[in-house]
Amino acid sequence: MSNDTPVVGIIMGSQSDWPTMKHAATVLEDLGVAFEARIVSAHRTPDRLYEYAKSAKDRGLKCIIAGAGGAAHLPGMTAAMTALPVFGVPIKSSTLSGNDSLLSIVQMPGGIPVGTLAIGKAGAINAGLLAASVMALMDDDLAERLEAWRAAQTASIAEEPVDE
Ligand SMILES: Nc1c(C(=O)O)ncn1[C@@H]1O[C@H](COP(=O)(O)O)[C@@H](O)[C@H]1O
């Protein structure tokens, strides 16, 4: 994690979400975007969530990535308490394969938006990329790094399949 003041907050409902959410962190690290990662739960630590969401803007955060599984109220409750962009990552749950997480996050009432990503690792990666895209609107150097990241990804895709 960079020593700069974090501009992206990654929050998750439990330590058990970190193996998924660390993919968002890795993208931000690769792109040189300063972030913080915290465990915050609407259910288990409601006071911590209130404090986090209410202070986020004043602390310099520009957007928040919130990952949660099951009854995934964290992204929506965060969005209820801040007008910063909130990207929600549904964690793949063991019982319902993340369908519960997805539906809990995506179906927000009009007026309180959560940008909902795909279930699991791909969603976390894309949340990191979206957060970087937001920051790149205000940072030309980051915009160039993002373009380079995308070009490198394209170049890494082989034209022909190989036996594994
Ligand atoms: N969905 C939420 C919230 C919340 O929405 O505030 N807090 C914890 N959790 C979720 O509970 C799942 C199981 O957590 P444990 O593994 O700690 O039992 C995690 O995926 C977490 O995101």
Image (spheres, rainbow, N blue to C red):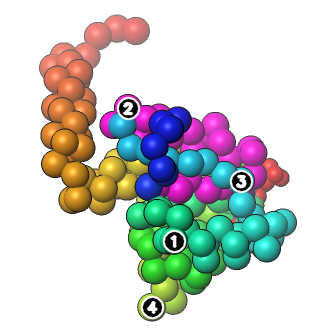
Camera-side mark, 1 or 2? 1
Q: From the viewer's perspective, is 164 left or right of 12?
A: left
The stretch in magenta equals 8-31
Residue tagged 2: 30
Q: Earlier in the sequence, mark 3 or mark 2?
A: 2
Q: Magenta span has 97?
A: no
The circle drawn on residue 110 is 4
For badge 1, the amino acid type reads: Asp
Which quarter of the image is occupied by the C terminus?
Answer: top left
Whether label 3 touches label 2, CB < 8 Å: no
| Residue 105 to residue 61: above or below | below
Residue tagged 3: 39
Whether label 4 touches label 1, CB < 8 Å: no
* Neighbourhood count class around disc 1 (C-alpha, 10 Å): few under 14, some 14–19, many 20 upward: few
Residue 67: % across, % down = 59, 57
Residue that extends furthest to the right in the rendered view of this protein: 44
| Residue 121 to residue 81: above or below | above
Residue at coordinates 30% horizontally, 56% vertically from top-left? 135
Q: Quadrant of residue 68?
A: bottom right
Which quarter of the rendered image does ligand 1 occupy?
Answer: bottom right
- The secondary structure type at the circle numbered 1 is loop
| Residue in the foreground of this view, choosing between 146 and 23 | 146
For badge 2, the amino acid type reads: Asp
| Residue in the foreground of this view, choosing between 138 and 3 | 3
Q: Earlier in the sequence, mark 4 or mark 1?
A: 1
Residue at coordinates 43% horizontally, 35% vertically from top-left? 29
* Neighbourhood count class around disc 2 (C-alpha, 10 Å): few under 14, some 14–19, many 20 upward: few
- The secondary structure type at the circle numbered 3 is strand
